[in-house]
Image (tube, helix red, strand yellow):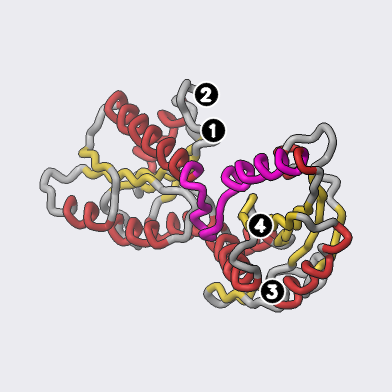
Amino acid sequence: MPPGLMPAQRVLIIDPDPLFARIAKAKLEKWGYAPQIETSGTAAYEWLRAESFRLVVMELDLPGMGAAELCRRIRELRRPYYTYVVVYTGRKDKSGLVTVLEAGIDDYLVKPFDALEFRLRLKNAERLLALDEELHHGSGTDRATGLINRGTFLQFFRIIIADCVRHSTSGTLLFIEITNFADAFRRHGYEAAQMLQAKVAEALSTTLRDSDLFACTGDGEFCLMLHNRSPDTVCPVADIILRRVGPLTVEYEDTRMHPVLRCSIVGYPQDGLSAEDILADEGRALCHTAFPEEGAPVV
């Protein structure tokens, strides 16, 4: 993989011309990207709803949904990260330029463009996406849910662990997992899974106290810090949360989704384990599973 390239960078190429699309795909693969081709704006939008692409490269004149409308819809998607959009055209006039710029594209190329220029534009996109990722983590907030993210939670947790060691106190982490998050992704796509997570986060936030340290620590996972609470006193808290949030129904287009929530706990501090180790502990004790039953499908 070329130096500076973001890991597992996927690119969606949208062009009705199969020859040009194959050439672009070959170039991108040579430079270390993982490109995918679509021939129409309508088909591409379905992929964008179902999958997470950070970089989209498309022809201005597309069958079905045009480039401007597709870009507008990309900007409306619920995404934790930014999607960089490049539009190109063989038109000599600039009649379509204003429209796609207003729709929110990031870069515009005129065909024919040479390989060096194309690669330099992509490197510029990489730098901006890397900055977006840095700002995303540095801001301390998970964009999809509005909760603090894993990195910020860890910063607080390290301080709490140090304080516990100094003063011989302890506490418990309560994890709330959406066990059918992956099922929602497989059945209905990325957008549906993100909506499911956001709605659960919203419901949980209204259930907890404002003073509770509550974070989104991963896809389909939340963590609540309960300081000065022993693990054997936390399960009643989980029961209250699950009774209020468990029956939640999330409507996505013509689909009704029901989150399956599982609670588990782990105490802190633990001898020899850092805050990162405790947060990643796979030996969590199962506390409870909410409505509907474990393994119930997304419908």
Q: Which mark is residue 245?
A: 3
Of mark 4 and mark 3, the one earlier in the sequence is 4
| Closest to the observer, 43 or 270 | 270
First reached walking from the N terminus: tag 4 or tag 2: 2
> Mark 1 is on which residue type?
Pro
Q: Is residue 88 magenta?
A: no
Task: Give whichever of discs 3 and 2 has the lower sequence position.
Answer: 2
Name the residue beneath numbered marker 2. 1
Q: Disc 3 marks which amino acid?
A: Val
Mark 3 near mark 2, Cβ–Cβ under 8 Å? no
Among all residues in the image, which is located at the extreme left?
93
Q: Residue at x 70, y 55 (%)?
A: 225
Label whose residue precedes the other's in the sequence (1 or 4): 1
Q: Which residues are magenta?
A: 137-165
Q: Secondary structure at mark 1?
A: loop
Distance from Cα at disc 4 to Cα at disc 3: 14 Å
- Badge 2 marks a residue whose secondary structure is loop
Q: CA distance from mark 3 to mark 2?
A: 44 Å
State the separation of the CA atoms marked 4 and 2.
30 Å
Q: Are marks 1 and 3 in contact (CB under 8 Å)?
A: no
Tell me the quadrant of the picture where the C terminus can be found.
bottom right
The answer to which of 290 and 298 lies nearer the viewer is 290
Is disc 1 surrounded by few (<14), some (14 to 19) or many (20+) residues within 10 Å?
A: few
Give the residue at mark 4.
Answer: 220
Which numbered disc, 1 or 2, marks the residue that appears first in the sequence?
2
Q: Nearer the viewer, mark 1 or mark 3?
A: 3
Pair 1/2: label in front:
1
What residue does disc 1 label?
7
Q: Amino acid at mark 2?
A: Met
The amino acid type, in three-letter code, at marker 4 is Gly
Mark 1 and mark 4 in contact? Answer it, CB < 8 Å.
Answer: no
